[in-house]
Image (tube, rainbow, N blue to C red):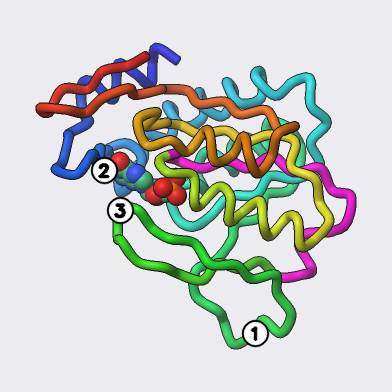
Amino acid sequence: MKELQDRILKDGRCLPGGILKVDNFINHQMDSELMFHCSAEFMRLFADRKIDKILTIEASGIAPAVFAGWLMRVPVVFAKKAVPKTMDKAFVTTVHSFTKNRDYTVFVSREYLNPGERILIIDDFLACGNAAVGLADLCRQADAPVEGLGFLVEKAFQGGRDLIAKALPDAQVESLAVITSLDDGQIVFS
Ligand code: 5GP
């Protein structure tokens, strides 16, 4: 998606270790118009799939997921990373964070993922694929099939797409900006 790629080239910064910093339009300050356009693109790309619910993970997946949910007229659920006292029954999984280099627990209340609901997973980044596969595991526990996964930015050099293909061979995977290299501070798109 050209608008997103142009913005990444303009405002994205490469950090050591293959990290792309996009704090000024996705991860801290959010450009709501750009997020809305990204969500409209998700709606177009997944138009052939019947989607009942969108699942994302806090925090940065929420903005594109909410706009997509509004456009597609489906509810949006975000997986949480800290267990609130008010939650008795939950689907729980463990995800390894590439950016923070640690494991964390992710969960969704059993109330909000139901058997047979067709799920679209949306997140900001696809890197190694652990967050996406963790979200898919929550759906598996709920007997809710994953129809598709949509990412704003994919770092293709970290292999996440292969991990998803193994875990979810029938799911449609779409990324709006696919980066093949961040070497030497240069952002290269596919
Ligand atoms: P994965 O589980 O695919 O390795 O990583 C996905 C998660 O890690 C995303 O939800 C995102 O929050 C974070 N992440 C991975 N790589 C990057 C990156 O280069 N920049 C930013 N800002 N977040 C990243």
Q: Is residue 132 left or right of residue 1?
A: right
Q: Which residue is mark 2?
A: 23
Does 54 sit above or below residue 72? Answer: below
User: What is the span of residues highlighted in magenta in the rendered image?
Assistant: 109-126
Q: Residue 119, position in %: x, y?
A: 74, 43
Does residue 44 appear to the left or right of 128 in the view shown? right
User: Residue 73's image quarter?
Assistant: top right
Disc 1: which residue: 86
Is tag 2's residue or tag 1's residue first in the polypeptide sequence?
A: 2
* For discs 3 and 2, the disc positioned in front in the rendered view: 3
Image quadrant where one finds the C terminus: top left
Q: Residue at x 49, y 57 (%)?
A: 58
Residue 38: give x, y in percent of width and height.
Answer: 50, 26
Q: Using the numbered discs, state the Cα–Cα distance from disc 2 to disc 1 in whole angstroms.
A: 31 Å
Q: Locate residue 151 relative to residue 112 in the image: left or right.
A: left
Give the residue at mark 3: 99
> In the image, is residue 168 above or below residue 81?
above
Task: Look at the numbered disc 1 and give the secondary structure of its residue.
Answer: loop
Q: Is mark 3 within 8 Å of ligand 1?
A: yes
Q: Residues within 10 Å of mark 2 (few under 14, many from 20)?
A: few
**Residue type at tag 3:** Thr
